[in-house]
Amino acid sequence: RIATEAEATLSDVGWKHKITGRRAALLLATSGPRAAAAAAVPLLDKAEGSALVWACHVSAYCLSRTGELDVALSASVRGHAAHRGLTEPTEWYPLDWHPWVQLFNACEIHANAGRLGEAQALAAEQYQLALTERSVEAQAWFAWQLTKVLGQRGQLLRAANHGREAVALFDHLGRPQFTAFCLAHLAPILAGSTQREQTAAVTERLRRLRTPGN
């Protein structure tokens, strides 16, 4: 509501675009990817700077889930380039993440398109870069991505190892929401490799994380 009111009253086009991008992200949480894409995609042709980066991020994520995979991948690639082009700290602040988040989206898009080899190659490349740059956050995200794609490719042992790694790293970073995301992927991988006790432990921890008050 606040974002909608601001969009209606602000005269500065740049700020309106920034707010529209953030409203699109809120729509994703409240109304789903189609509604969020409807708000974010029009910005791709007119936004600049951090507003464009945010619009690309939301558009890529949402369109990869509504089946518009080519447009989603284009938005991801464009968002990564635009994100890397930001130079002012004030431009970075509203974005929450570093440019590699756009490539995380690209991995998702490749996987949703059935291009699992390309998704794995990109995730592995970014994972190695994270190790080289000692970026714990990027390492956590791409360990999570490798968990998913390796699981889809039937490489359950490697997938489980990366899943445990991602959980540990997100625990270290204090990101329980992302820990829960990883546990949700790790549990069926462990079940598929008949690791029953570990599956039960992961499922129980996931239940506690998703239960209010725990």
Image (cartoon, helix red, strand yellow):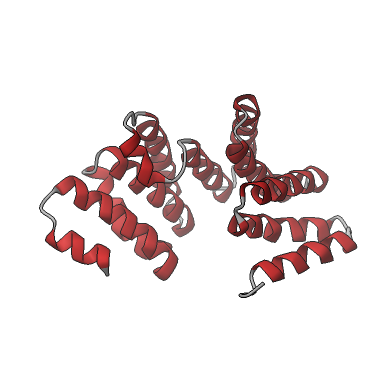
Q: Nearer the viewer, residue 157 or 152?
A: 157
Q: Position of residue 171 (x, y in %)?
A: 67, 51
Q: In this view, does 179 lie to the left or right of 12?
A: right
Q: In which quarter of the image is residue 131?
A: top right
Please, is residue 174 above or below residue 162 in the view?
Answer: below
What residue is at 25 percent from the left and 39 percent from the top?
48
Classify the position of the N terminus by image quarter: bottom left
Q: In which quarter of the image is residue 194?
A: bottom right
Please, is residue 192 above or below residue 214 in the view?
Answer: above
Residue 34 in view in this figure = no
Classify the position of the C terminus by image quarter: bottom right
Q: Nearer the viewer, residue 82 or 204?
A: 204
From this viewpoint, which residue is outermost toward the top?
132
What residue is at 59 percent from the left and 59 percent from the top?
177
Q: Where is residue 101 in the image (x, y as percent from the top left)?
A: 49, 41
Q: Where is residue 127 in the image (x, y as percent from the top left)?
A: 64, 33
Q: Where is residue 123 in the image (x, y as percent from the top left)?
A: 61, 37
